[in-house]
Amino acid sequence: MARISVRSAVAVVALALALTSGALVVGGGPGGDGAGRSTPAAVGPAAPLDGLRGGDLDRGVEALRTRLREQPKDFTSWATLGTAYVEQARTRGDPALYRAADRALDRSLELRPGYDAALAGRAAVAAARHDFRGALRHAEAALAENPYSEPALATRIDALVELGRYGAASRAADEADERQPGVPVFTRYAYVRELRGDTASARRVLERALDGATAPGDVAYVATALGQLAWRQGEYKAALRHCGAALRADSTYLPALECRARARAARGGTAAALAGLRDVVGRQPLPGPLVALGELYEAKGDPARAREQYRLVDVWAALARANGVDPDLDTALAEADHGDRAEALRAACAEWERRRTVHTADALGWALHVNGRDEEALRYARRATATGFKEAAFRYHRGMIERAVGDEAAARGSLTSALRLNPGFSPVGAREAREALRSLGGDAS
């Protein structure tokens, strides 16, 4: 990517400090023995941490550490602390905390071998690191000890989804709904339905989950999921309404702030969207909001600031990798659109070998396309859209690849479908889709 500016260099240093500070803070760990994420991958937290939601999370972690200094053999608190570190890592964008989680969970299992909560915690750490085979293995081990473990049931669904085993994920969601109906399971159940193109069922399940949510953290989580679903379907007014409900429950909830900014950008509120995304990346500099902010700057005619955001994706990826997180899916699309195309293809191929999902198929197809390998790319673009998942970016990628191979009729259909579904799916991508559609004689209005 382009050489970094002084302002961006300062941001990189700040990001590096943010991502390494966790190791410095928790390195000693309670008791002096070093006990001390999902992403756009996992749907969300595997289960609420009682008493450790929202702004109480940091205070809860400190309370657990104090307790464990006094009661170092409390295996339950070690497991809770490990799971809390995973949640801290997710909310802060700080992968260094996964090492602290490992130490706490290992200590719990030393004290109580086979403890299901600690095994479920290990599953959550593996999922956060994008080791979905490991996550599935640990979740199954936890369920062998306790078939009703809500965190394990939820993480098993996440792992199966992220491995592309959608049929098994659907069965796991049905089983989890029978055993432990509640917010964590409902949200996964909804996403499995959405992946199959059944957005109506997904919405109904999320609304059911919202009706049953009482804790502010749960309300924010589910309302944001509804907002994100609405945004993906181009329903920006509904997205803003749901994000507003989430932020009334928790004004600091970053996924809701990001969703609101994306919806505002799609409705033409560029200034408000820029301010919102700057706030998000200032507190959690993850690839999704960084690229979204960069594209807003690019669409606004400010390429220098756009490059700064794209450069920070590289920094995040390097630090994530150093802390055991696999960032290839995140970096493949960012590099394909805004950086090193050869690196995009390397990352996409590596991720495809690890897991074969609609998202990895889309990333590999797009990386092949930008590297001029369009006939190969089309096979993966078709696979990305085969389940019926209503994602405008997938349809845009497929349409651009179809145009490149000379299938103009198919390209018009795919590009038209992308823009009808979510005309503001990307400030840059939507603009390019309209330009391509006009060149094909389609209606880009």
Image (cartoon, helix red, strand yellow):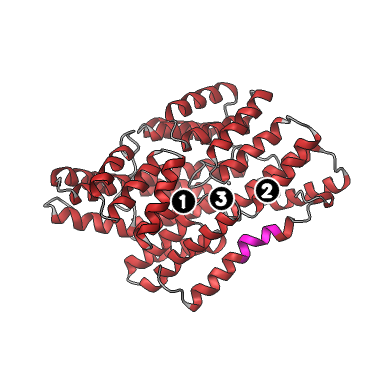
Residue at label 1?
328
Q: Residues under labels 1 and 3: Cα distance?
A: 9 Å
Q: Position of residue 188 (x, y in %)?
A: 50, 34
Residue at label 3?
325
Q: Position of residue 170 (x, y in %)?
A: 46, 27
* Along the viewing direction, whichever of 11 and 383 lies nearer the viewer: 383
Please give the name of the residue rendered at 54% of the width and 70% of the height, measured from the top-left corner.
Answer: 11
**Secondary element at tag 3:** loop
Please give the name of the residue rendered at 85% of the width and 39% of the height, measured from the top-left corner.
Answer: 73
Q: Nearer the viewer, mark 1 or mark 2?
A: 1
Dot placed on the residue nearer the N-terminal end, 1 or 2: 2
Q: Nearer the viewer, mark 2 or mark 3?
A: 3
- Image quarter hosting the C terminus: bottom left
What kind of residue is marked 2?
Answer: Tyr
Write down the region rendered in magenta. 17-23
Q: Residues under labels 1 and 2: Cα distance?
A: 23 Å
Q: Which mark is residue 244?
A: none
- Quick check: is 21 in the magenta stretch? yes
**Secondary element at tag 1:** helix
| Occupied quadrant, residue 343 | bottom left
Q: Is residue 295 above or below residue 237?
A: below
Q: Position of residue 368 (x, y in %)?
A: 31, 50
